[in-house]
Image (spheres, rainbow, N blue to C red):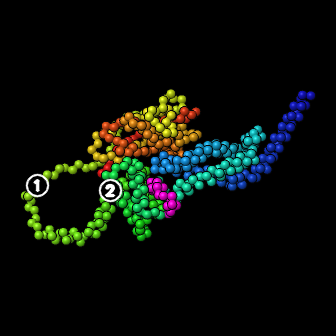
Amino acid sequence: MDTIKSIISVCSDIMVALSNVRDEIKSYDKLGEFFTEDFALYTTSIKEIHKVASIFDELNYSKLLEHRTVDFLIMTHIHNELKPHKEFFEFINIWFHRNNCCYLLCCICSSSNRLPNIMEKMRENLECVKKQLITMNNLKRQVFGSSIRIEHPVFRQAWLLVGENQLNDTSIHQNVLSDNFYQLIKNIAGEDESDKKDWENKIYALLQYIEDETVSESDSHISIIELNNLNYKFKKCKTVLDVLDIIDIDEYIKSKEKANKEESEEDESEEDESEEDEEPLKEEDVNIEIEPIMPKKKEEIIQTTFEDSVEINYNTQNSPLDNCEGYGSDFPAAKVCHFVIPDLEQKVICAEVKMVACDQNWGGTGHVQVRYKVNEGKHEHAFNVNRSSCPDNQYLFNIKGTELSSKDRVELFILCPKWGGWSASVSGVDVKLKFKI
């Protein structure tokens, strides 16, 4: 009797399996439509979210945009919610590349591997992504306006500082853009009104260069198209100081001085006529001691104590930093290295720190931090490690010149969350002082 029941049970299971295979074969006819429509729309939507989120990540900790903190937090949440979609992509990739026998066996054994269920899961995910896209589109328009069309990050940051009534314009007045470039410079080099005239001349040279490189007639406005036409020229520039270093400032300053000189040419000619009656100085009456002029440096490489890779993870028994504020200040920290500012004979614009840093390289990102401390001061935030916005793991940040003096000791630290699986490491540090010339 038991044998007969077992045979009936086996036959019943076989019938169910055959029914599942038959249903799967019927659904298989819809596979082409599934990949050309639903899956294509899904992948495009995910890529767009990553693209815009990466642009947000570039600005997330800019002090000039602190009034947008809530917008950045919303974007971070949206970005973090993409993790389940990544896992679904990996599942689809494995599922799609199975051979027929393995495919049918999986369909028989697991309902989650059947095409109708996969299609249903896809539609649920697509609806979720659709809501995220709507939120992102509103944020993008609200924060970036027309600046989202600007390809170079430095020019995009300068455009973002205009008022909300101008944020969606396609061209802005040179005076406005000049002020915005100066704000970016102060954000890096600190505030020193004595240097304002020098920076104004350099910004003037940059704006004139932009005008000269376009085919349209010169006017008082700079357009998005004009800025994008110069992207190739400034491709490797990461800060506004890098952009200004490329321009031959002397050439444009001479043209500016020439224009100013022509305005007062008549007055100068009258003064020259009155001076013709005076007796010229004799060579023996002139006694001038000439001191040698030492050439000024633009930059200087600073030696650090960094020797080998520094690592920390969620299990490391390190303490948080003291005198530390803001998000992540309670994370365990590890010292990376330190460096000492040499005797300064020139005014320092900033200390430029380049660092190779990474997190655990899977799962979430954007929470590992790097901070620095000058002497016994506060541990200041430098940047967050984010694989989405910086896939090559190479980061650059600046310490303002106003924070630095001769013999100052600067220490660098990496901070890692105490969350399961999280880790952080630094495998390279280079420091360079940039001087005002």
Secondary structure of residue under mark 2: helix
In the image, 346 versus 227, the foreground residue is 346
Residue wearing tag 2: 197
* Drawn side of residue 22 relative to residue 238, left or right: right
Q: Could one spot residue 47 in this view of the protein?
A: no
Residue beneath disc 1: 287
Q: In this view, does 403 lie above or below 163?
A: above
Residue 164 highlighted magenta (yes or no): yes
Spot the residue most to the left: 284
In the picture, the quarter occupied by the N terminus is top right
| Percent x, y of residue 343 | 28, 40
At 42% across and 37% down in the image, what residue appears?
A: 378
- Residue 431 is tagged as none
Of circles 2 and 1, the one toward us is 2
Residue 250 in which image quadrant:
bottom left
Where in the figure is residue 116, as x and y percent of width and height? 75, 47
In percent of width and height, residue 400 lies at 38, 45
Amino acid type at circle 1 is: Asn
Kind of residue at badge 2: Lys
Magenta-drawn stretch contains 75: no
| Secondary structure category for the residue under label 1 | loop
Residue 318: % across, % down: 49, 29
> Residue visible at 39% across and 43% down?
399
Please provide the residue range marked out in magenta: 154-170
Rendered view: 55 above or below 277? above
Q: Earlier in the sequence, mark 2 or mark 1?
A: 2
